[in-house]
Amino acid sequence: MKHHSPIIAGVDFSSSSSQVLAHAAKLAAAMECPLVVAHVIGSSTIKEWEDSMGREASTAQRMDEMKERLAELVAENSASRAAAIEVRIGRADKALAEIVRDHGADLLVLGAHDVSKRRLGSVASHCARSLPADVLLLRDWQGRFFRKIAACVDFSPSSAIGLERAIAVAAAHRAALEIIHVIFPPSRDPWGKVMDQPMDSEMSYETRVRERAGRRMDEFLKPFAASLAGITSSVLFLEAECPAAAITAHVDVAEIDLTVMGSREGSW
């Protein structure tokens, strides 16, 4: 599956950088696209170097050092895949956005830096919410391979993009893919029953809602039939008043390694 837009791996030389690069390289190989490894040096760090070593010597020397470290990291973790190297100065989220834009990339891979395992780090959170590209966030405690992936869909265009990404990752990792859709429990929707249920219907309102969701899913998945045929996949419908809570609980119980969902428009 050839994909011309490059994948950007954002690394900061923390403990998760190796797995970020390994995942990005694996996806780049599977999608036959270029790989760019990027590092951002904070402005405050540059200021400290300038104060101690002088402006020109400090900045140029440190930039070269960072490029050398990136090259070493690539050699150790990219499975012999060639990669371009980018080092920028500034605020990490803004600099990464510039790199994504300059390279015309549509996927950025980052470490989540979730020390508590509950919240994202500030850079990861900002990139996921505002970057004009898809973002793959890797938890600090995750390994290099995904076994089970969940794609959460609400039939919107953004969730179609998310499903396409999830299929590509599942194929690259030979992982199982679970396609999840959440509906409001029809048994807790009396007004829906009053407004939507024909008086002479032989089918219960609950059954009609579930069958309608099934038909929408079938229609939604038609464009993905060929790519889904190449992986192990299943469809799951959850019924909940709060989709986020239902998805979170299921991901935990089902031991899902990666959850993919759209975030650019009126989605969850």
Image (cartoon, helix red, strand yellow):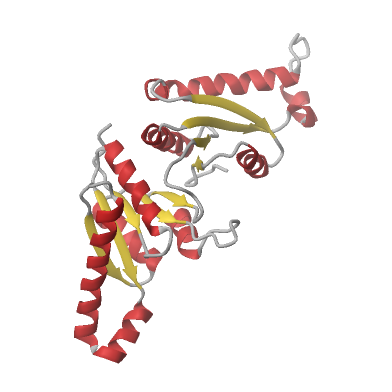
Q: Nearer the viewer, residue 169 or 154?
A: 169
Residue 42 position by quadrant: bottom left
Q: Is residue 243 left or right of residue 9?
A: right
Q: Is residue 212 left or right of residue 68?
A: right
Residue 214 appearing in the image: yes
Q: Nearer the viewer, residue 121 or 217?
A: 121
Residue at screen point 38% across, 23% down: 230
Residue at screen point 56% across, 19% down: 215
Q: Estimate the x, y position of residue 68 in percent, counting from the top left.
A: 22, 66
Rendered position, 240 above or below 100: above
Residue 201 position by quadrant: top right
Residue at screen point 37% across, 21% down: 226
Residue 132 appearing in the image: no
Q: Residue furthest front?
A: 76
Q: Estimate the x, y position of residue 245 in percent, counting from the top left.
A: 67, 44
Residue at screen point 38% across, 67% down: 92
Q: Is residue 91 left or right of residue 240?
A: left
Q: Nearer the viewer, residue 136 or 17?
A: 17
Q: Estimate the x, y position of residue 192 in percent, counting from the top left.
A: 74, 28
Rendered position, 228 above or below 111: above
